Image (spheres, rainbow, N blue to C red):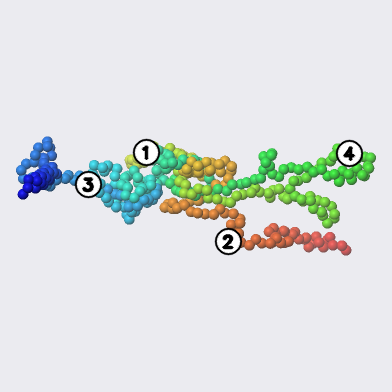
Amino acid sequence: MSRRTILILIFVFGIVLLSIVGVVFILQQNQPTTTVTDGENGAPAPDGVDSAEPVETIPPLVEVVVSLQTVPRGHQMTADILALDMRPVESVGTNVITNIEDAIGLYARTDIYQGETLTYDTLVADITQIGLQTFGPSSLIPPGYVAQAVPMDRLTSVGYGMSEGDYVDIMVTFLFSQIDEEFQTYLPNDAAFYLEEQIEAVEEAGSPAILLTQPVIFLVSPLGRFEELPTGDLAHISPNLEDIAPRTVPVTMIIQNARVIQVGQYEVPPDPADLIPTATPEPLEEGQATPTPPPASTPTPTPMPDDVVVVALQPQQQLLLRYAVGVNAQVFFALRGVNDGQLYSVENMTLDFLLERFNVEVPPNLGYSVETIVREVTPTPTGQAEEEAPE
């Protein structure tokens, strides 16, 4: 064997030996080292404790009531939408409801989302008393909304059927009138006509008693038309001005699902001390005179019905509604169901829509009509008729 071959073998053997040493070193570095402590001061665990099993501490849990679905404000809680869920005991306060029976029959004070933990603050027994019990009506206004007062009466307020917490649709009808663009006054304008033919006829008469030095101007109604009568005379025919009404636009639903914040004038909640019942008087002893009852108080007058309602809307909708009230538009409210929050696509109500939608035929113009007034004819007495009869 040559010297060169021996050197090559030694070089290869050295490389293999270095590779083995490197692999052993890497394996020793990657080997995990586990030290079990007693959990107090970091000292090694006593003998007999298995270092491969970690010790875990599970916090105590408690059952709480949650909602299985998202419900709007005013929804009554029922057993089918309630369930129990586990929560860490340190995260459960005294306000959290832990019994389903305590939540059944109550109403949602605000919108409740699916999986939300129910508290006594989110539910209320009487939905109409929320505004009085918590910071006045402002507590009912949702974020991003503002509220304003709108006039109402028995017809526009669904027969006074609206109350706090309800949702309504608002319908508006505007009244339009034509105006003169230059004068900015209502049409029709007054008109004065100069009748030249009549002036020439007077001048041709040549009467010495009539001397015209200025044109004669006749005021004629701007509404109407000139017609020639069967006698040949020219007459001006004008309509009855009392029957002229301003133009109305279609009845349109401009706002849907608006929240009613308050009905009528706001009143400060009464003092709870005033609600304490009067103590029952003690019975009288035998032979003691019965005290005279106090005079009857004046009967309480019947309160006037509410004439204003406060609704919560977006700021732009509030401006629209304020403009409608300012121009004396007709504003009507339509009451919604408790759980009806859907937005509907509706068409404006016009006369053309009425005729086409319901296939109403316009009757032709007739030369006669049904008499609507019963005309009473006083008969002549028989004796008087005989006396007045000619002999």
| N-term-proximal mark, 4 vs 2 | 4
* Residue type at the position of mark 2: Phe
Label pair 2/1, CB-CB below 8 angstroms: no
Label pair 1/4, CB-CB below 8 angstroms: no
Q: Would you call the spot at circle 2 few (<14 residues within 10 Å), some (14-19), or many (20 or more)? A: few
| N-term-proximal mark, 3 vs 4 | 3
> Which residue is under mark 4?
212
Question: Residue 93: image x %, image y %?
Answer: 27, 42
Structural distance between the alpha carbons of marks 2 and 1:
58 Å
Left or right: where 214 falls relative to 296: right
Q: Is residue 135 at all visible to an observer of this figure?
A: yes
Q: Quadrant of residue 122?
A: top left
Dot label at residue 358: 2
Name the front one of labels 1 and 3.
3
Structural distance between the alpha carbons of marks 2 and 3:
64 Å
| N-term-proximal mark, 1 vs 3 | 3
Query: Which element is circle 4 on?
Result: loop
> Which residue is under mark 1?
272
* Residue type at the position of mark 3: Leu
* Residue type at the position of mark 1: Pro
* Residue type at the position of mark 4: Leu
| N-term-proximal mark, 2 vs 1 | 1
Structural distance between the alpha carbons of marks 4 and 2:
64 Å
Left or right: where 153 falls relative to 192: left
| N-term-proximal mark, 1 vs 4 | 4
Closer to the camera in the image, 127 or 138: 138
Name the front one of labels 1 and 4.
4
Q: Would you call the spot at circle 3 few (<14 residues within 10 Å), some (14-19), or many (20 or more)? A: some
> Which residue is under mark 3?
61
